[in-house]
Amino acid sequence: MPTEPDADLVLTLRVNGDRKRLLIPANRTLLNLLRQDLGLTGSKHGCDVGDCGACTVLMNGAPRLSCVTLAADAEGAELLTVEGVSVGGALHPLQAAFHEQVAAQCGYCTPGFIMALKALFDERPDPSDEELNEVLGANICRCTGYTKILAAARQARERMNGRSA
Amino acid sequence: MSEHEKPSGEPVPVGRRGGKIDGLPKITGAARFTDDLTLPGMLHGAFLRSPHAHARILSIDVSAAAALPGVYAVLTGADLPTPYGVIPVAQDEHALAVGKVLFIGDEVAAVAAVDQETARRAAALIRVEYEPLEGVFTIEDALNPDKPLLHDERRRKGDTNVLRRVFQKYGDPEAGFAEADVILESSYDYPGSTHVPLETQVALAQPHPDGKLTLWSSTQIPHYLHRIVAKVLGMREQDVRVIKPDVGAGYGGKSDPFANELCAAALARKTGRPVKFILDREEVFYAHRGRHPTRMTLKMGVTKDGRITAADFKAWAAGGAYASYGVVTAYYFGVFLPLPYKLDHWQFESHRCYTNHPPCGPKRGHGAIQPRFALELHLDKLAHAIGMSPEALRLKNTVEPDTETSNGLRITSVALKECVDKVVAASGYLEKRGKLGPNRGIGLATSAYMCGALHPIVQSEMPQSAVQICADRSGRVSILSGTADIGQGSNHMLAAIVAGRLGIPETDCVVLESDTGLTPVDLGSYSSRVTFFAGNAAKMAAEQLYAVIRAAAAEKLGGDDVVMAGGKVFRASAPEKALEFADAVQLAEERHGTLGFVGHYKPPKIGSRFRRQSVGPSPAYSFTAQVAEVVVDPETGFVTVERIWAAHDCGKALNPTIVEGQIEGCVYMGVGEALGEEQSYTKTGLHRAPSILEYKIPTVFETPEITTIIVESNDKEGPYGAKEAGEGPQLSTVPAIANAIFDACGVWMNEAPFTPDRVLKAIERRDREARRAAAEEGA
Ligand code: FES
Ligand code: FES
């Protein structure tokens, strides 16, 4: 793999189901790849050093801080960003719950929370409150005090498991 | 016109819970924040910042930077010499340093290049020769006439770095203290803290061939930015268009015009290309404009039966290198003291100083957080001293509705007693206080806050908010407003008011906000003014539209008892013969012509006995009571805030889910300030923690369970009764936690944040004093 910052490399990956093939500088971060090269601006720069979670995406199903991931590491990977979460125009239950609970105030942290929670729900369809907290704890929200985010996560859990909420 | 103003008597259905009209894009990734915008040929900006806290600039050599391939322009202070500042009497900033640098991180030069990396590399090639000057780092330094002045040369002997001293006196404090049975005096220290909105400051400027300019920016006050960009760039205001896209919150931190905005504009004009200028996370900690670190003394007297007789308050704030809103801060320190408790005899003196640090400014609860911390702790101390329950002492002194405070603030709706009662009942405060066992405690605090400033920053008799609405033949209603939704939900608030009046779904309203090229002026998102001011403007516009549609429908339906509800227009006496709202709009348009109306809000002229009282008065005040339950680890000094109950009098919740969110956000920010957030510097003015990790932002693990209780006092002048909810609730959080710590372990935390080292020290002091007392008793 080329290591000089100015060397270019060819990258092939799938993003939200679509196959992409791009020529990028070797030092491109995954976040900048998504935002600048693919125009997927839903993932956010909150800190660029791995402290806030606003840039969280799923790489082969696992949450990844895209600001501290080299795009080159995504060679051959399957990526999912917030733009790919609602399929065919229908909101994911997590998104519906976030909307109803007004869990997004400014909404800057929201894509990161949705992706982190989606990864959890994909792996454990009926997570405990502690497990929800564990996931929330890796992301920063400065607006909500996490209260509505937790309420939305719980509501989504109940609905996805056929319980009323 | 009289027809438009006719009151219908029909209640307006506001208060639906749930999603915001513009909520979905933020959840699907479709929302567009400034950094999400790109323009063809866009360049990127970067700053060179000062490594010195205080130094004279002897020379700047930009040649190496300008010669770097990919660089399009370099600016220094000489290119933008016009000073500016939000407050007319404090025009002390420059887009780039002119002559001197005043803090580590002060912007010295700006580069536009083909990409951010090149711009940064170029900025690093700029050579600056500095002559370091002695720094001013403490309040003592700032008050010392022998220290160098940050701004200006010393004109008179004795001049210091005090930006503003305010002294006000009401009643007869001396006589008041003479009436007191108990007088207590303490010193308090409140730390500086910063907002850390998750979106950093971002600006994108586009020059147009006709010499005009469009600036997209993450601002919370497009109007002031508009004026200042025009001023600093020497442009006509009508040639500058400021657009605020979605903003990743502000909490006050995006109220000032920032160097990146001014430099993006100037670089775009210089290069003829769009320029995006982003601050990185570390730079935001230096841009700051956060809470003033404040030292205070408070002396207060009470009678044995709990009447507050007098108060004497002093505050000194180390405000950093520029004034920002600091003149206002100096007033806010004092003017809210007789709220929410009656206080007839009192005085305050405040000093807002310059120091060689990043500038302080307005942060949520601006200027009121620090005195409220001191006052609420002090009240608990007094209650303790006279053996009264803290909640009873507060209730005894609460201001009454429809009264005037001793300093001339007009009080209208007050539901503080209800807030206290509810929060006390919900938390079990009375049963728990003093009985939770060792190291667990419960504490109460209350507060009041403004709903916008009566007097605008730039004096004018013009309205402070305006809203324009148009009804489309399809039944869609567009709302144009200069308000800035930065996440607090003001777009939804406008739609809730208009839709409520017209009886249509909120989602049939479209809000176009914050575009100084299209939307009518609003002074912006600060001082908790938006719901009260813009909400009233929207209400005024909606009522005119309502009257016209209703009159047309009455004619068609043949009766006066027309009601608009559920998207239909019908006679109350014959609901089965209903018109669709769209059809009623068309009837009205036939009769009236195009349906466009404007509404505005100008606060009432409230006469005050005190002419000098121009900063502080508001058309209404919100009230809050909070209870905190904490656990203190006596071994480590670590404080855990387990639960907070918050009751807030917001007048009327136009959307309770959003109001709860504002209260929760306030409590959260208060918990952060209580437990560890601190914008602090080394002795030479270097930021100690300029990253999200080091600055210690609470995660979900440090955030308590928050129970919110909405209390509605239905303010007579608020839009359908509404008052603010976005700042006031933060005022009670820190003192409630401090009072809970006292209940837990018997120590008064006069200094925030309540970090383990401070708490441990306080516990050690408590034990030392107990030993000494025991020894004296034994002797
Ligand atoms: S932007 Fe990636 S963790 Fe903050
Ligand atoms: S909603 Fe604003 S940071 Fe989370």
Image (cartoon, coloured by chain):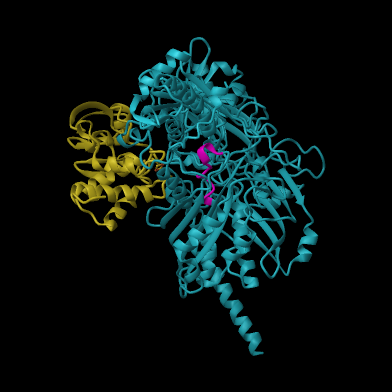
Chain colours: A yellow, B cyan
Q: Would residue B161 appear left or right of B357 to someone viewing this image?
A: right
Give the image location of residue A160, x and y in percent. Answer: 20, 47
The quarter of the displayed image where residue B127 is located: top right
Residue range highlighted in magenta: B718-730
Main secondary structure of the magenta stretch: loop
Residue B311 shows in the view:
yes
Q: Quadrant of ligand 2?
A: top left
Depicted B546 relative to depicted B660: above or below: above
Give the image location of residue B490, x and y in percent. Answer: 46, 35
Q: Would residue B753 appear left or right of B462 to someone viewing this image?
A: left
- Whether residue B744 appears in magenta in the rendering, the answer is no
Q: As rendered, which of B271 and B720 lies closer to the eye?
A: B720
Give the image location of residue B249, x and y in percent. Answer: 45, 39
Give the image location of residue B715, x and y in percent. Answer: 56, 43
- Whether residue B719 appears in magenta in the rendering, the answer is yes
In the picture as drawn, the residue positioned furthest to the bottom comes out as B779
Depicted B110 relative to depicted B208: above or below: below
In the picture as drawn, the residue positioned furthest to the top comes out as B210
Residue B112 shows in the view:
no
Q: As rendered, which of B58 and A67 lies closer to the eye?
A: A67
**Figure disc tally:** 0
